[in-house]
Image (tube, coloured by chain):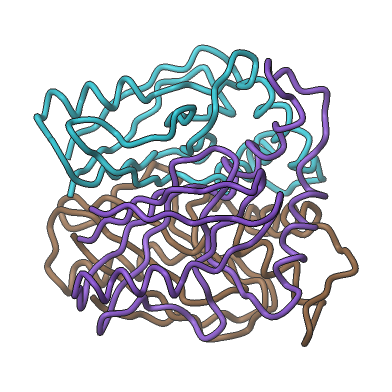
Chain colours: A purple, B cyan, C brown
Amino acid sequence: MIKISVKTAKKREVVDITDQVNEEIEKLEIKDGICNLFLTHTTAALTTADLDPGTDQDYLAAFEKMVPKLNYKHPHDPGHTPDHISSALIGTSLTVPVEHGKLILGTWQKVVLIEFDGPRERQIVLQFS
Amino acid sequence: MIKISVKTAKKREVVDITDQVNEEIEKLEIKDGICNLFLTHTTAALTTADLDPGTDQDYLAAFEKMVPKLNYKHPHDPGHTPDHISSALIGTSLTVPVEHGKLILGTWQKVVLIEFDGPRERQIVLQFS
Amino acid sequence: MIKISVKTAKKREVVDITDQVNEEIEKLEIKDGICNLFLTHTTAALTTADLDPGTDQDYLAAFEKMVPKLNYKHPHDPGHTPDHISSALIGTSLTVPVEHGKLILGTWQKVVLIEFDGPRERQIVLQFS
């Protein structure tokens, strides 16, 4: 088990973490297996995405539009509630296969962290089985 | 592999199952590893969430608003269809790391079962690797 | 690790892959464990669902309605963007328990591939731990 940090630079951002995860796989000399990623936060998410130029903005625009802005009850900061909803909906755990020392992904597929309340330093736990 | 039951008390409810899962980890004397949770139902979901007081109602209100009420074709009870949509969208499998005999979670992060069609007794399969 | 193919027949479709996965489990003579599924695509998704007759159309109608049609920036084909959003939201990884040589699922629960941009031949990586 290792823990990696991802520094996000904006309030809302899609960060491609594929290369960072592959570098850890290389350092640990893992050749084949299963890579489990878990994000220990409630206003960010992990998923896979197509990241053609501009597409990161498309994901953020769509999530912003989909998650309703209601009269939320959150005691400290109800304005954060849509960020919590997006995180719970997209998810914080992801399991990706590893082969020949790299994540197996589709041609256009990337592993991404979606930041909804940055900039922050986010922690991801990586485990291999 | 063990199976645990979660009794839900309301039609729609966010249930914090973190302590219940941690108790099973303690009983099984698992120190470090990966905890896989799988929910064997189609009108409930598993995810991680922030559970400040009142926030459970925020999640339910948001999902209720997001999932459209269309003229659904479900043969027995089309009124249940939004519950099925929410379950498929949020998901029924979750993988969380374990360290020092406990789930690794963020400060405000909880493992939750979201009930969309209770009250019921829900089954979760727990596996460790 | 094995890779399986799923041929989709329509532009948008919910395909029940439960039997296909169970056949692979039988061939590999896996009795108990964890089945990790990973879909190497960005316009399709994996999840669990209730598949009563007609319900497949309900899922597709709901996702179509939920994901907004905005002025997307995707450089090649912005019309595909809602398919990418649905894929990232529903997810491409799924972990299901195996017992007595079969996936453990609820009475009405199926493992499904949701196609948003078919017809295509989709690849799924299956791993067991």
User: Residue A2 appears at what percent x and percent y?
Assistant: 27, 54
Furthest toward the left, the residue is B29
User: Residue C47 appears at what percent x and percent y?
Assistant: 49, 56
Q: Nearer the viewer, residue C12 or A46?
A: A46
Who's the residue at 14% across and 63% down the image?
C30
Q: Nearer the viewer, residue A69 or C105?
A: A69
Image quarter hosting the C terminus of chain A: bottom left
Q: Nearer the viewer, residue B29 or B8?
A: B29
As drawn, B52 above or below B30: above
Furthest toward the right, the residue is C71
Report the side of A38 relative to B26 (left or right): right
User: Residue A27 appears at what percent x and percent y?
Assistant: 24, 73
Report the side of A123 relative to A76 (left or right): left
Residue B90 sits in quarter: top right
Report the side of B101 relative to B47 (left or right): left
How many marks do you count on the picture? 0
Who's the residue at 66% across and 47% down the image?
A116
Who's the residue at 42% across and 69% down the image?
A20
User: Residue B101 appears at what percent x and percent y?
Assistant: 18, 31
As drawn, A10 above or below C44: above
Who's the residue at 67% across and 69% down the image?
C84
Q: Nearer the viewer, residue A48 or B116?
A: A48
As drawn, B22 above or below B68: above
